[in-house]
Amino acid sequence: MPTRLLRWPAAVLAAAVLSALIPPGCATGPKTLASHDAQVKPILAKMTLDEKIGQMTQPDLDYINDPADVTNLFIGSVLSGGSSDPKEGNSLQAWTDTYDRLQQQALKTRLGIPILYGVDAVHGHNNVLGAVIFPHNVGLGCTRNPALVEKIGRVTAEEVRATGIQWTFAPSVAAPQDIRWGRTYEGFSEDPVLVQQLGEAATRGLQGPDLASPLSVLACAKHYVGDGGTTYVVGPDGKGHLDQGDTKVDEQTLRKIHLPGYVTTVKAGVGAIMPSYNSWNGVKASASRRLLTEILKEELGFQGFLISDYNALDQIKPGDFKTSIEISINAGMDMAMVPGSYKTFISRLKELVQEGRVPMSRIDDAVTRILRVKFAMGLMDKSRPPLADRSLHKSFGSPERRQVARQAVRESLVLLKNERQALPVSKSAARIHVAGKNADDIGNQCGGWTIDWQGKSGPVTTGGTTILAAIRSAVSSNTQVTFSKDGSGAQGATLGIAVIGELPYAEMHGDRSDLALDKEDLSTVANLKKAGIPVVAVLVSGRPMIINEALAQADAFVAAWLPGTEGQGVSDVLFGDYKPTGKLSFSWPRSMDQLPLNVNLPAAGYDPLFKYGYGLSW
Ligand code: GLC
């Protein structure tokens, strides 16, 4: 076997060989989506062009000034983007009422085809107050536990369905190759084999054994394809940029690193896939017939539908919006996420069909794919009104579900250093001094995509347990726990715990040219060190950071990633109730000039501070 092929991880090779054996248009799910075509055909035959184009149109809640638009324009789907919330606020009630109100509008149409309502439930139902917020994927990658990731998908699906909503734009199956990218934390790993395993597990959890179950949601693998492989550039603003950039790789590399997550999620029967903003060698993924139709639909046999990213059609240049629509729909896009331009989209697409620039066969294929999914989900079953089942409210955010998240936090932590037996900490220590900006802040430990698109510091986001509160609840009644954000006042304590790292961000707002700890964190750790006590550092961040100085000063160092609402998962490890098992899913650099740094690059230059797969225990 040629040596180059030997570099392909065996699982990727096996998946690629298997997918090559699948005849085009034949997914291998237990009940394939295409098996619903006999039910689709008669409906499609009686649909008007307006009704067909309406199914292909997805506005955002924020821009729907008149809910009757859903009826009058035959809208097939509505989304709420990261900060697009009900006017009445983010309560479980408000979300459920909003869903029902829009669904009732859809049921007033001639054919009464229900809408699919989509949200970014990417680490729990993170738009809704009181939801269980799980660790972001960067931490789940360190668990190496597909069964747990599937369970998280299951719980997330049940929390989402409690609001009536039936579609999440997850899982991300990006394979981030450069941790300067602001979406690194949405990826499971730099390693495509791990991405495959956990992406498939997440899809199975979300969609369940049967998409028609009232506790299943439609999953959406994203962002197709190569979103994690863009080239770092310094923009006119002097800042580093990766997000929505250009992935400059040959097709073999694209298939080896960025395609695997789609091979397995398609095999698992994923019903939707979201083409990416990024380009592949200068061509927008959302405009590429090679990517959308030839590889994904024909070669891999994807039978569901493609949903564009948020206003991604606007980025297709040159040409006006109408030309962008023509290019993307003819390339294979099936539904357009056109948050505020949905009326223009509808009228331009209708013109394109009437002018023969978009063939009716393409419209019929797109609508067939959308209706296949709606049949598979039981949405077309007139005996099952598609309104919310409010009996699911009683278990929303339940203690049992929080235990699943707590276990995920425990298993995601990676122990990078432990000297002088600093860890585990005794629960009966006389005094523990806690410090750091991320010690007592639910918003910071949840990160982006939490209530708000960008996330938000402070308790304002949702319920949960901060790491400080978890430490307080873990220790004996004789132990004193003191806190100062800057680490002052630690003198005389048994030990100090500094919880440091990043503040919340999402997407391009997280692109960085420098990942060094900020001065505040360095000062916090130094203040604990100056107190002459053992120092434990806990890093709450969306990715590896440059930690050399703090690492040298700390006796123990734990990477906690973005753990979400269940901070007790962190204290479980710190106090030894759970031995650390986490293994790095990203390589950890010594300095910024090593980036990009990952296991897929030539072995010669690979010299990380901590290797991919590193993790200590005791
Ligand atoms: C965003 C993201 C995508 C998300 C979509 C809807 O810009 O790129 O991941 O699903 O818009 O919020």
Image: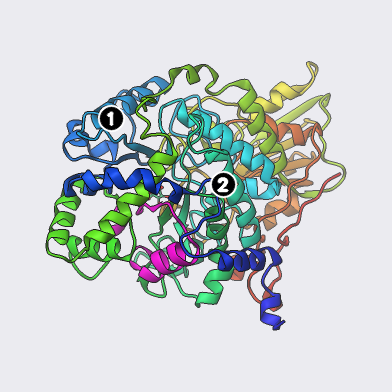
Q: Amino acid at mark 2?
A: Pro
| Residue for badge 2 | 30
Query: The N terminus lies in which quarter of the figure?
Result: bottom right
Residue 498 x %, y %:
67, 39
Q: Magenta stretch? A: 285-313
Q: Position of residue 17 (x, y in %)?
A: 62, 68
Q: Residue at x 57, y 46 (%)?
A: 30
Where residue 178 sits in the image (x, y, percent)?
55, 64
Label 1, label 2: how many angstroms apart (C-alpha)? Answer: 32 Å
Relative horizontal placement of residue 504, taking residue 527 as reference (left or right):
left
Which amino acid type is marked by label 1? Answer: Leu
The coloring applied to the image is: rainbow
The residue that label 1 is drawn on is: 102
Describe the element under mark 2 as helix, strand or loop: loop
Residue at x-position 52% and y-position 35%: 124
Q: Does 579 appear in magenta?
A: no
Which x, y percent locates residue 432? 75, 29
Q: Going 65% across and 50% down the picture, which residue do you hit?
A: 141
